[in-house]
Image (spheres, rainbow, N blue to C red):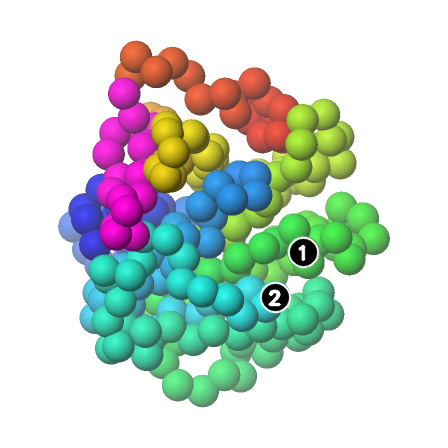
Amino acid sequence: MAETLRRVLNLGTSARSGEEDTAEAGPPLLLLGGPGSGKTALLFAAALEAAGEGRGPVLFLTRRPLQSLPRGTGAALDPLRLQKIRFQYPPSTHELLQLLCSAHEARGPAPSLLLLDGLEEYLVEDQGPQDAAYLAALLLDTAAHFSHQTGPGQGCGLIVALQTQEEGVSGDALQVSLLQRYFPAQCWLQAETPGPGQHRLRACLDPGGLGPRAEWCVAFRPNGEMTITPWPTQAGNLSLDKGSSSGGQP
């Protein structure tokens, strides 16, 4: 996978570098965007990248099985990498909470990366912000537990994808605002339409105070290969900065 992909997703997957090894992974990353904005594709690409690093397995949580492989991952498919990705499909919030609460009882090597796709599908069942806060805190606690198991110099990253809604949906804005307290780093995705037969995304990465924002162009070639390059500066600011479906992104 290209080095640029690592730079886009490394906040949730890489351990911090320093003079001494540390089990502390990078800050948890919240991946946000509307329908079709490439959240699942980037999550799966992160899973393949982490699975090829020679560390522990990857735990990929989603409500339902993938019907097809996401864009941009065909060229990177390696049977050995795929074997290291453990898919689990908790069908409800209750089952998801049970799975996370029982993580400390799981046998085998601890995951080096924890991914959750479709967080909004679990939050829709909740009765209020306290339930969303509890789920977010439990995800962080589970990743911390895995980090402790992996030992020094390893750590378990955490990336969670949330689908944002249309402009002016106040409930969505409040939900994102709450989650930002638990996920200081966010990556906002916006689908672009460069032309017929082309698929391109604009990604704005906010590292949560650990560095400057960065904007990237995620393009999918006709053969399915995904490329990530810096977004042209002359294109202006990401429209998600308006604070509509972004839930008030600063």
Residue 63's tag is 2
Q: Is residue 40 above or below residue 33?
A: below
In which quadrant of the rendered image does the N terminus lie?
bottom left
Q: Which residue is mark 1?
A: 121
The crowd level at tag 2 (other Cα within 10 Å; few <14, some 14-19, many 20+) is: some
Give the quarter of the image for residue 57: bottom left
Considering every residue shown, the one lying at the far bottom of the view is: 107
Q: Could you tell me the amino acid type at mark 1?
A: Glu
The residue depicted at 22 percent of the width and 65 percent of the height is: 53
Residue 173: % across, % down: 68, 32
Of residues 103 and 85, which is closer to you in this image? 85
Q: Are marks 2 and 1 in contact (CB under 8 Å)?
A: yes
Residue 217 covered by magenta stretch: yes
Q: Is residue 217 left or right of residue 182?
A: left
Q: Which residues are magenta?
A: 215-232
The residue depicted at 52 percent of the width and 59 percent of the height is: 116
Which type of secondary structure does the marked residue at label 1 adopt? Answer: helix
Residue 199's tag is none
The residue depicted at 56 percent of the width and 18 percent of the height is: 242
Question: How many callouts does the rendering have?
Answer: 2
Residue 205 makes an appearance in the image: no
Residue 145: % across, % down: 47, 68
Q: Could you tell me the amino acid type at mark 2?
A: Arg
Residue 39 makes an appearance in the image: yes
The residue depicted at 61 percent of the width and 54 percent of the height is: 119
> How far apart in space, not on screen, are marks 2 and 1 (Cα)?
8 Å
